Amino acid sequence: MIMDINQIREYLPHRYPFLLVDRVMEITLGESIVAYKNVSINEPFFNGHFPHHPIMPGVLIIEALAQACGILGFKTVNKLPADGYVYYLVGSDNMRFKRPVMPGDQLKLEADVIKGKRGIWKFACRASVDGELACEGEIICAERKIA
């Protein structure tokens, strides 16, 4: 394990119920990240998102991928939210969903840098469960100074 939840909280400003990365297993600065989101029936969105057949909303899978991208971006440029920086999700391209993500699943989040220039990053992303692809596409994030 590279980063536990306490270390992740230093690199992401998100908090419950919107912190969607539980663990980082691999990170290569400027290149790639592998992280996990443990999906629990206790997630607040399951109360209203098909309550009799609960599945994780696709937009939250994209958000979890974007948060993993944010960690990679922050660590690569050696900045923190505490320094007054934030990574915004500014775009997604070619996102496709291949299987539902359900309570009890462990969602593997993978992102590879396609390019980074002047605080704008583009990533090739994949989310999978037990080796089976759940979602893939490209995510664009922008680094901004807010304080």
Image (spheres, rainbow, N blue to C red):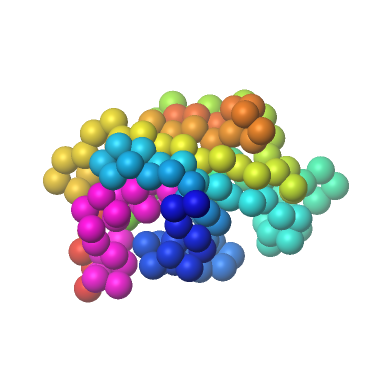
Is 135 colored magenta in this rendering? no
- Up/down of 101 relative to 60, above or below: above
Name the residue located 46 percent from the left edge and 37 percent from the top edge: 110
Residue 132 placement (x, y as % from top left): 64, 27
In the picture, residue 13 is in which quadrant? bottom left
Is 66 colored magenta in this rendering? yes
Q: Is any atom of residue 71 visible in this view?
A: yes
Q: Of all residues shown, which one is farthest toward the right?
A: 52
Residue 90 placement (x, y as % from top left): 33, 46
Name the residue located 24 percent from the left edge and 71 percent from the top edge: 83
| Predominant SS along the magenta part | helix
In the picture, residue 44 is in which quadrant? bottom right
| Left or right, residue 47 beside residue 85 | right
Closer-to-camera residue (53/32): 32
Name the residue located 54 percent from the left edge and 36 percent from the top edge: 127
Q: Is any atom of residue 121 visible in this view?
A: no
Residue 25 placement (x, y as % from top left): 48, 47
Name the residue located 85 percent from the left edge and 47 percent from the top edge: 52
| Left or right, residue 93 beside residue 51 | left
**Span shown in magenta:** 65-86
- Up/down of 105 relative to 7, above or below: above
